Amino acid sequence: MTAITSPTATVDPYSLGVPAPARLYLNHLNPLAKVAAVLPAIVLLVFVQDLETPLWFIALAYALIVSGTRITARTAALLFLAIPLGVALIGFGFSLWVDAAGVDGTAPLLRVGEWTLFTGALEIGFATALRLASILALALIGGLTTAGPDLVRASIQQLRVPYRIGYTALAAYRFVPRFGYELSVIRAAHRVRGHHGGGGPFARLARGWGYIVPLLAGAIRHAERVALAMDARAFGAHPTRTERHLVPFRTRDTVFIAAFIAASALIFSLTFPWAPA
């Protein structure tokens, strides 16, 4: 069996790319293009030690996300509240673990008894925090704009990942929301029967323990239904499988990869050497 190449093939209706307008270009790129574009920068960011390089990449990632995808309240809270707060906390926390003997030549910033926090330690701590934040920001370019099914289908269609592995992983991925639904049904059933059990920590622990058996039973039933459905569709009977939904790799994907790698190379060249001053 071969993959469908007809123009009538559609995109997965659960994909993020369908409802997005054309101006939200990140949602319409191939998932593999977004991974391939940021991967070289992520690898090199592991080795940088300065403050400037990760700041440039955070600015680049934020510019792409803000201009290329839909910004919800949850996304805005992540980008402009959670990440900056995490950088502040992680940066200050890491600075406390820096060996003072290696930075005692820098200006002291804070003294508590015999302990001194030097500006060099603070710089090393925030360089590490910003490096982590830049890697996260680059990963969010694809993470916020890619649907899981599209990534699996792109891996099968472009990377030639065996569909037995890809669709098995996709089926396992879809177990997670199913478990959430089953847990909500079990909780509602317990409330209907008046099994509240109080509001203390031990009562909550007892209620959680009571969810395990029915949740496992529901998971087994769902796994059996999925296995029967896959058998009915002759899953694994042929080396290839017909694709109903195509995730094509277009010219714009190549242009995005080339442009992002060029921008990354420019940033790295301008900020080299990537070491604290």
Image (cartoon, grey):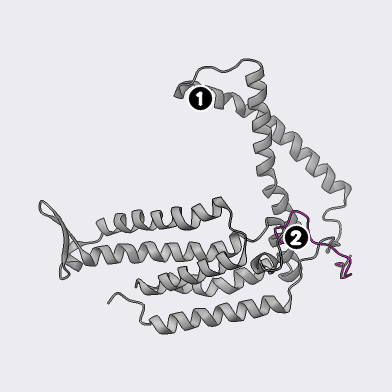
For the point 39% across and 73% down, which residue is it? 48
Res 127 label = none
Relative to 199, say whether 44 is above or below.
below
Q: Where does label 1 land, which residue?
A: 204
Viewer-side label of 2, 1? 2
Q: Is residue 199 left or right of 35 when viewed as pictured? A: left
For the point 58% across and 54% down, which residue is it? 72
Q: Is residue 259 magenta?
A: no
In depth, the one of 125 and 69 nearer the eye is: 69
Question: What is the three-letter code of the residue carrying label 1?
Answer: Arg
* Stretch of the chain drawn in magenta: 2-17
Q: Examine the residues drawn in magenta and state their main secondary structure.
A: loop
Residue 234 spot, x, y in % from top left: 87, 52
Q: Is residue 9 magenta?
A: yes
Q: Residue furthest left?
A: 114
Q: Residue furthest top?
A: 194
Question: What is the three-letter code of the residue carrying label 2?
Answer: Val
For the point 70% across and 65% down, which residue is it? 155
Res 18 label = 2
Place residue 256 in its image quadrant: bottom right
In depth, the one of 73 and 83 nearer the eye is: 73
Q: Quadrant of the C terminus?
A: bottom left
* Mark 1 neighbour class, 10 Å CA radius: few under 14, some 14 to 19, many 20 or more: some
Residue 61 spot, x, y in % from top left: 52, 68
Q: Is residue 77 left or right of 160 when viewed as pictured? A: left
Q: Label 2, label 1: how many angstroms apart (C-alpha)?
A: 41 Å
